[in-house]
Amino acid sequence: MRPIGIITQLLELIVALAAAPLFVGWINQCRAWLQNRSAPSLWLPYRGIRKLFHKDAVIAAGASPLFRLAPYMVFAAMVVAAGIIPSMGTRLPLTQVADAIALVGLLATARVFMSLAAMDIGTAFGTLGARREMMVGFLAEPALLMVIFVASLISATTALPAITEHLATQSLGLYPSLAFTAVAFLMVLLAENARIPVDNPATHLELTMIHEALLLEYSARHLALMEWAAALKLFNYACIGFALFIPWGVSTRGSAPVTLLASLPLLVAKLAVAGAVLALIETVSAKLRVFRAPEFLATAFLFAVLGLLVHLLLGA
Amino acid sequence: MAGVSLDLQLLNLCAALLLLLSFAMLSQRRIVNLVNLLALQGAVLFVATLLIAWRTHQAHLYLSAGLTLGLKVLLLPYLLHRLIRRLQVYWDAEPLLNISGTMLIGVLIVVFSFGLAQPISALASTATRNAIGIAVAVVLLSFLTMIIRRKAMSQVVGFLSMENGLFFGAMSATYGMPMVVEFGVALDVLVAVLVLGIFFFQIREQFDSLDLHHLESLREDAAARRAE
Amino acid sequence: MAPVPHSPLDACLVLLALWGLIGLAGLVRPRSLRYVGRTLFPLGALCGLALAAVAFSAIGTPTEHALLLVGLPDLPMHLRRDALASLFLGLLGAVSAGISVFAAGYFRRGQGTSAGLLCLQYHLFLASMGFVLLADDAYAFMVAWESMALASYFLVTTQHSLGEIRRAGFLYLLIAHVGALAILLAFGVMQGGSWQFTFDAMRAARLPPSWAAAAFLLALFGFGTKAGLAPLHVWLPEAHPAAPSPVSALMSGVMLKMAVYGMLRVSFDLLGTPQWWWGVSALAVGLFSALYGVVFAAAQTDMKRLLAWSSIENVGIIFTGVGLAIVFHGAGMPALAALALIALLYHALNHAFMKSLLFCSTGAVLHSTGERNLGRLGGLIHRMPWVAWLSLIGALSLAGLPPLNGFVSEWLLLQAFLFAHQVPHTFINMLLPLGAALVALAAALAAYVMVKFYGVIFLGQPREATLLHAHDANALERLGLLWLAAGCVALGLMPTQVVGTLRAVVRELAHVDLPDPTAPWWLLEPLPGRLASYSGLALLLAVAAVVLLTFLGVRLFYHRRVRRAAPWDCGFARLDARMQDTAEGFGQPIRHMFEPFFAMRRELPSPFDRAPRYHVAIADPLWLRLYQPLGSLVQRIADAFAVLQQGRIATYLLYSFVTLVVLLAVVL
Amino acid sequence: MDFLLLLASPLTGAAVLALLGARRFAPELNIAFSLATFLAACALTVHVVSAGALSFAHEQFFIDPFNVFLVTLTALVGLTTAIFSRPYMRIEIEHGRVRAPQLRLYHSMYQLFMSTMLVALTTNNMGLVWVAMEGATLSTVLLVTLYRTGASLEAGWKYFVLCGVGIAQALFGTLLLYFAAEHALGAEGVRALLWTHLNGVKGQLEPKVLSLAFVFLLVGYGTKVGLAPLHNWLPDAHAEGPTPISAVLSGLLLNVALYAVVRCKILVEGSLHSALPSQMLMGFGLLSVLLAAFFLWRQRDIKRLFAYSSIEHMGIITFAFGMGGAVANFAALLHMTVHSLTKSAIFFAAGHAAQKSGSQLMDHIRGLITLSPTVGWGLMMGSLAILGVPPFGVFASEFLILTTAMREQPWATPLLLAALGVAFAAIFGRVQPMVFGETTARRLPHPPALLPVFVHLGLVLALGLYIPPYLADWYRAAARLIGGG
């Protein structure tokens, strides 16, 4: 493990922790502009988290230790995930520890802990949220795996950095299979991060909420960790997307360490664009009924599988 | 029938008579007559045995002829008659198949059994080889009798006439079986009839009739389920 | 005491014999729980430990043979201990040790069968499984195999006063017997005219492909019945819940693995060179079972039934691995074949531990609450923390989440799938990734099922007042659970070592092997150069480190206090335990999505009901479409035959007459 | 000497018990005579093992490996059945189903039946075989009707008529055999029915005649074996007679009849050099197995159930003999042994079960295990054994038969598989609720004798795990004798 690796690793973690709330803020800002509302500050998420950390925690009477453990677990899972995804450099020690499949597993672990925590209090909404979250999850997870499979079939590996490098170093080869999977991935991203059309992050309306229902019982620092974890999750997904579909500009093995610095602004740019696109999608599309969500995800799954078949047919 | 000695002609006549008698049994519905026919069959058998014995000078055949006379002509019919009197069963019910149909089948059976006996008689060294087919026919005809009859008694008669057929077969094919077997068979037949006697009384006291349709309760088909 | 054995095989035999003796000892004072429960079962557990130690340590060592002077006249029972047998013996010993300890604390008074008899059946069950693994000729194998079925049948029908338990037992033994007959016929094919039923003769016999295929399919059927592959699974969700929990654990955890063992033994060892399309058949059956099992598991409302269905899923995954291995082997891709074999063996080990763990914990729950219905449980994490936290480990591993063991084997299997695209058959190339997709789907659904299982039993508010008096498991039970949970963690955290062991097995079984690892000891890299690696330990450390840092950070900077309050009721008047999701509720999305899978009967209340009542019953369509028609077919044939015998003597005479005439006509 | 005792003891027993059969000590006397027979049989066995095949009384009687173990088996089952029948018949008397004179009949006929069995087994004269078989029918027919109920009379009548007619066919077959033999042997006609001589010249016997003879013999003795479709007397006779008789009918009579068939098959195959007899046997066997399996499905009377299972197993054995060859014959002989042991044990247990719950209807027999574990376990273990669950001996033979069939006659295996599956479902589905669950049983005036049950089951278990060498040698020698395949 060479120092450059450790540097890259730490840098990525810091950037992720810092940039995740910012990304959320940016998306909200874009949304506001598109819906020509007066936009909230870009730093609002930070303030929210900071405020929450300063509050007294209120915990439901019937809560078990699991309830208090969950936020830390989820947060940790997200941070480690951020450490695995090559958003800036591919010289990441952690990526040896967990490849793409393990990454999906890690995200699943976070989801399971969230759902269990939500069921722990035993309110109607908690269990409702848990059920819906798992429902979304068990369809989104295989879809995400399929997406990753296509990429890893192309580059004959499941290690993310290797995939990224392979795709990045290609002389701009066009992969029709990746086009399919990109669509699939986008849908998964929306579903997994509780965005419209599957869920609405900005509502507490019982009948439709999924993500918020999970957090209903959390307060103060626990809620803060959960919010932060959510932001990280979105960030991670975005970075996965970059790593798979627009990997260019990442500082790869062999390239000079300096490229690492160059990759930072590039990442910011990518994020900016991605945020704008997400905001656009969320603005133009309408929230689905909860029972439509499976069909939405099934479509994503189907697209991913199609991508797979296309790859096997065309060998590209 | 030139060139054929008298006793042989007589033997063939006996064979023909046996066949005739079994047809008569097939058509006969009065049990008493049935028993008489059986006795008559036994008598013919006795004559045939004597002839063969006289022909072949085999001492043990005289013995078995005597056995036939004693058992099949005298004893069994006597026992059966007593049974009939004691149990007052004189008429058999309407047979399961009407007489003409039975006769038709009977004729077919005769043809079949002649065909069957062909290879055997081709080999047989005995003078009476041609009678083997008749023996087979008698056996199968009595089988038929047992199938179509409704009264236990007439089945028994059929059974005994089947025994006669076998005996005749043995005579005509091989001039009889070894003595020890003959005795054994005779003993068995005797015991069988005694057992039957006991049986009939038991059946009688159970159902006060010898009609076989009382004896149709042990069955597997749907009727059995309804019975329980 | 037993003489000191000088070879692993002898040691195994001695230990199996000891199990038998312990069982017999149970008949000495059958009613005394202190004697049977507190003495004999722990002894059995010790035997198990010893067996595990001996067998696992023997995996590298050369194959041994032995003869028992019993059996058929020309066929004394042959015994053989090779790597595969050792592996499964180790599994048997290790898992049964945990279960026996648990059972020692588990059995109470007042069950149908007396404790002593139970002890006898239990240990005979263990011993017979051991002999299944050691048997080296068809007769010995069949005897051990059926004894296993028989002993487990008697264990299943412990509480035989209950009608449905008798029904379950009947179904179980019937299907087991039919399966055993199929295996018997498979052996009949494999002995290939040499009238020796030793496995050596079968290895030597070169069968024509058609016969070999017949043998394989018969074996797949036979072992499939025992493994509970759909559509031969119907006995499993009946029998496993019917048995006392330790027995369910043994059946799900260990006995199903015997079927896997048999399948491997036949297809790789006895038949020698499997053909690739056999693999496809096994693959199809396995995938179908995996999906079918997990979907039905999601819809269950009885906790043991749920676990039983999930066993069907896991067996399906294992057989998927078998199929994959055969395909690779047939297509001449040794490394991938080895990978698939290792993956399935690994999953077999994992499932043995985690499923036994969960079954045992359901047993503990059952004892302290007397309740199997998920709809009447809840909130037990407060009353029985030990069981709750230990079975959390089991649930997470069964959900296939890193860094626990369930994930590792699925990871390996997915790796195998992923690099399968050089198979020289196009349409398999097309199908394999879809298989991967199905496996992924099954795994994700398994997570759903486990959240349901764990959340409904242990989390939330207790749904019944009686649950407030629930008590935690006693010391022995805790020990058993602890052992099994430790197994799950260990298998999850040191995959490299496990894979190293399994490589030896695979090398000997199918003469295929992985390239030697170049990665450090803590890093699992099955196919070097593929750049696909995973380390549960490091992952756990990383997550733990972050958790710790976060925790310390929070503690350090923001020390605000925590108060307890009533949960927020969203403005409802009162929020009671009955408002939580029941098991039906939690399974509802699955039922909704997989509607065609289920034969469902719903009773929906009308909006104006005074006492509204909602009821839904799930039936297994395979039972309705496959088994019931079969039963009625037999009934119809029987009725048709019955007409032959309607009691009239004349008819019977007619039969004889016709038979006679026909036969005469034939010979004429 | 020992041979003389073997035949004499049951005969004298019959005579003595005809006088004393109603006394209080009659059952013990019965046991004593059976014991004597058994000891004689053992002595004879030792004798044969040491001296090889023997013949007595101008070769009218002879002992070879094939029949010697059947003789021992017969004597053994005779003894155990006698032991079992002691309390059983006493209980029947207590229940008022039997009266003293009938008991006398029962005891003397029991001994007579044993003697006929032994004669049929040991005689060398095919004619005497016939006589003895007929004698067996006659001696048991009155025992079947012992209870004098309508059903029992009907059963007895069917038994009598069907077997009588069948046996008559057998006589004709014997006649043809004699005919052919005389033709071949020429002068020494007296010896022409001695099996050993026939076997000597079987090559020269006229095939046509022998094939005809075989048909008659097969239909004749096959009726007593209970081969479908000639089996119709069997379930009735087994179900309606007293249980000890059902036990000996299933355990001994069927075996002996099959023994006769096989003897004939040996001769005919020797002369025909064609597969015809084997095919006939296989056909009959398969048909019996299938029919019996599906009839089992409908049974509600416990003894009827196991009667049909006897038909099924006779079918299996016949099928095996039909396949022929060393392995199949070996398996068939083994199956004969274990079947008669197991089946008689089952009948013992079933008899007491029926007595305990006062009905033979299986719906009325429940939960035996709770009141009397021995009967319950006896019935359960017996049924499992007869269903071919290892480690019982029945499995050993079925193992060999099925594997052989898989190689030799693959077309038959699906049928066998289906039949065995159906039979398992039928029998086990009925037995399980009888053994388990809430009980309907009540106490008995006399303690049941279950020693025989467990002796038999123990033997069957032992045979499943270990066949002693000398026994195996018998089997092998007999298998070689039967040949075929």
Image (spheres, coloured by chain):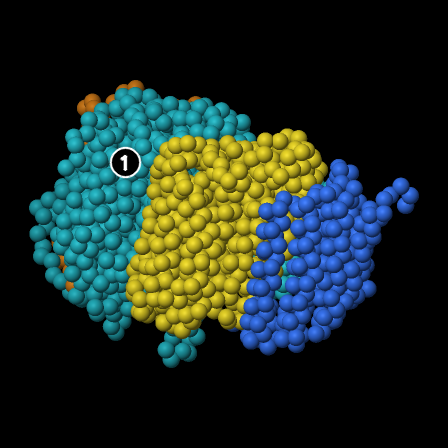
Chain colours: A orange, B blue, C cyan, D yellow
Q: Quadrant of the N terminus of chain D?
A: top left
Image position of D264 with respect to B100: above or below: above
Front residue of this view, candidates C274 and C181:
C181
Give coordinates of residue A258: x percent, y percent. Answer: 25, 23
Quarter where residue C519 is shown? top left
Q: Left or right? Give the position of C587 relative to B64.
A: left
Give coordinates of residue C114: x percent, y percent. Answer: 23, 58
Q: Residue at x 16, y 30 (%)?
A: C4
Question: Could you tell me the amino acid type at mark 1?
Answer: Leu
Q: Quadrant of the C terminus of chain D?
A: top right
Q: Which residue is drawn at 68% across and 43% down?
A: D176
Q: Residue at x 8, y 46 (%)?
A: C556
Quarter where residue D452 is shown? bottom left
Q: What element carries label 1?
A: helix
Q: Left or right? Give the position of A63 relative to B32.
A: left
Circle 1 residue: C89
Q: Left or right? Give the position of C343 relative to D476.
A: left
Give coordinates of residue C161: x percent, y percent. Answer: 32, 64
Q: Which residue lies furthest to the bottom in this view?
A: C610
User: In this orientation, does residue C510 appear?
Assistant: yes
Disc 1 chain ID: C
Front residue of this view, candidates C407 and D154:
D154
Front residue of this view, candidates B170 and D68:
B170
Quarter where residue A304 is shown? top left
Give coordinates of residue C188: x percent, y percent. Answer: 48, 35
Q: Residue at x 73, y 43 (%)?
A: B57
Q: Left or right? Give the position of D410 relative to C56.
A: right
